[in-house]
Amino acid sequence: MLTIVSFVFFTALVGVLTWLITRHKETDSADGYFLAGRSLGAGVIAGSLLLTNLSTEQLVGLNGDAYTNGLSVMAWEVVAGVSLVLMAVFFLPRYLRRGITTIPEFLAGRYNDTTQLITNFIFILAYMMILLPIILYTGAMGLKEILAISDLTGIESETATLWLTVWTIGIIGSIYAIFGGLRSVAVSDTLNGFGLLVGGGLIAYFGLSAVGDGSALEGLSTLRETHPEKFNSLGSADSSVPWPTLFSGVLLLNLFYWTTNQQIIQRTFAASTLAEGQKGVLLAATFKILAPLILVLPGIIAFHLYGQGDSPIPQDQAYGTLVRNVLPTSLTGFFAAALVGAILSSFNSALNATATLFSLGFYRKLIRPTASDHETVRMGRIFGTIIALAAMTMAPMLAGQDSIFGYLQKMNGLYFIPIFAVVLVGMLSKKTPAIAANIALVVGVVVIFCGYFAPGFSSVVGQIHEFHFLGIVFVSLVAMMLGFAAIAPRPSHQHSSAGQGSAAKSDLAADQPYAPLQTGSEGLQTDDSSDDEFPPSPIDMTPWPLALPAGITLAIIVVGIYAWFAI
């Protein structure tokens, strides 16, 4: 009973505080609903970035991988620190200068309308069929174990319990995202973040204490002495993340996720100033470097406690089993509530991003170009409801996957790699024509899909690590686009009618060649173009003076962590 009371109390507290903070804020305009009125500060941005990323696919899935593979899987967290540094100093100034709302909107300005439509379609389909169902499924599985849902409800069927939990989470998350917009998403993220970080830290502490007979330090020493292979940052050749993949698929997936993924970076587009955005992103990078303490270490602890002997538990049950056995009953409800917060954060952030992509990329661009902000927001809410219902229906069908985290990363590669290649070339090359980007998007998805699933082709690809395969596809797509630029370069005078959302408002719809940013006298990265070509940004673009030094420091720390645990 104490578990349920504390769970309901913390969940209700977050909901009430979110409503109190956001109730007088504007959500009827496009900027107000989709970008929180471009008013988010560094702390809210950092908290929202972390909570959008940190959900049960990490807590359950990544700890499950650590249970089997050890510290080498920290690549998904530590390398993210480097990706966030690049986001802060390289990508974010370019995005904010244009006042865009979505990544496809940026591509419309750089290439053409077709590029935007293809990217919008890929994002929406991927979020609906891959990301949202996985968030709901892993969340339901985690809560089902921690709260003993079957005992509480009296429902004995595992399938029925799964469906009930999925739909409960989905409905609550939909209310946050559909009716509150990005501001309520970001605020609830920040409030839930405190509970999740504290709860995650307590799991590691109590787990180490269980290993060390009451002493956390003794427990850590026991783990390192008993399982030295689990603390090797480089991993073995047959581990899920062998070290050479850090320079191919793992790096590319991380770069896309933190610099180009609409679900994640939409809150950085809502920054009140460039400096606030950079500080928020770099603060998130700092926490990501520390994330293995709650996303990897508990998995190793679970291996020591439950992974040896004649009946080791399955890896994706490792985290739930550890929580249930080591966390005091008085704290279980609070942690379950924080876990729900993480689930809702990822779910409602992806749902809000999907509604944004549809409303600004399809509805206002193709269906009703003259739609008012009120109509656009209304259609976003309707479409978000449809997508939420579809995701809630598909989520229980994921039951039976061997490794849900491995499945997620594999499926992410389908669209991460082609879109990141197109965005990166668009930023660095003035001459690449739109046809090259459009071909790269379609061909990239098809080739990776065939490499994963097509008989014959997949067996050939299986001879190398799948992350190296993604790296090869990425390099091939970039080379193809640059080949187009060399053979049939885009005319410097070419224009298009791309961009109807925020880009249109700031005359950024012109399909003009992109000018690489250069470092000014104060370290500010600015466009190599006149203000006549690029109208002023809707926010203050003065950079944070310490952005580059802080970024370099974080990158050095990442290298140091790998070197320390490689010895």
Image: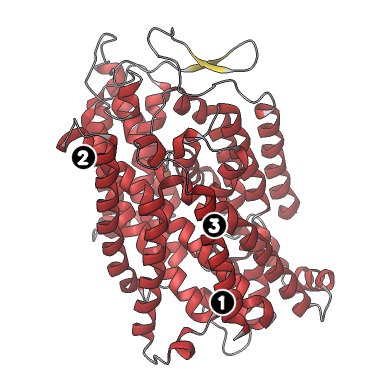
- How far separated are the C-alphas under marks 1 and 3? 16 Å
Q: Amino acid at mark 3?
A: Leu
Identify residue for label 2.
Answer: 363
Q: Residue furthest front?
A: 24
Mark 3 burial class by Cα count in 10 Å: few <14, some 14-19, many 20+: many
Q: Position of residue 545 (x, y in %)?
A: 68, 23
Front-most of residues 173 and 146: 173
Residue marked by disc 3: 54
The answer to whether any part of residue 282 appears in the image is yes
In x, y percent, where is residue 211? 76, 78
Coordinates of residue 265 in the picture (x, y in percent): 47, 41
Name the residue rendered at 59%, 20% in the picture: 542
Q: Quadrant of the N terminus?
A: bottom right
- Asked if marks 1 and 3 touch (Cβ < 8 Å), the reply is no
- Residue at image mark 1: 320
Q: Residue at x 59, y 60 (%)?
A: 236
Which quarter shows the C terminus? bottom right
Few, some or many residues within 10 Å of mark 1 (<14, 14–19, 20+): many
Q: 10 Å neighbourhood of mark 2: few (<14), some, or many (≥20)?
A: some
- Does label 2 or label 1 sit earlier along the sequence? 1
Residue 206, image quadrant: bottom right
How far from the left and from the top, in percent, is residue 7?
57, 74
Q: How many marks?
A: 3
> Circle 3 — which element?
loop
Q: Residue at x 30, y 73 (%)?
A: 397
Real-space CA distance between mark 2 and mark 1, rounded to the nearest whole angstrom: 42 Å
Q: Is residue 35 above or below residue 495?
A: below
Left or right: where 386 falls relative to 247? left
Decide which of 225, 30 is in the foreground and name it.
Answer: 30
How does the figure colour the protein chain or chains?
secondary structure
**Residue for point 65% across, 83% down:** 325
Decide which of tag 2 and tag 3 comes sooner along the chain: 3
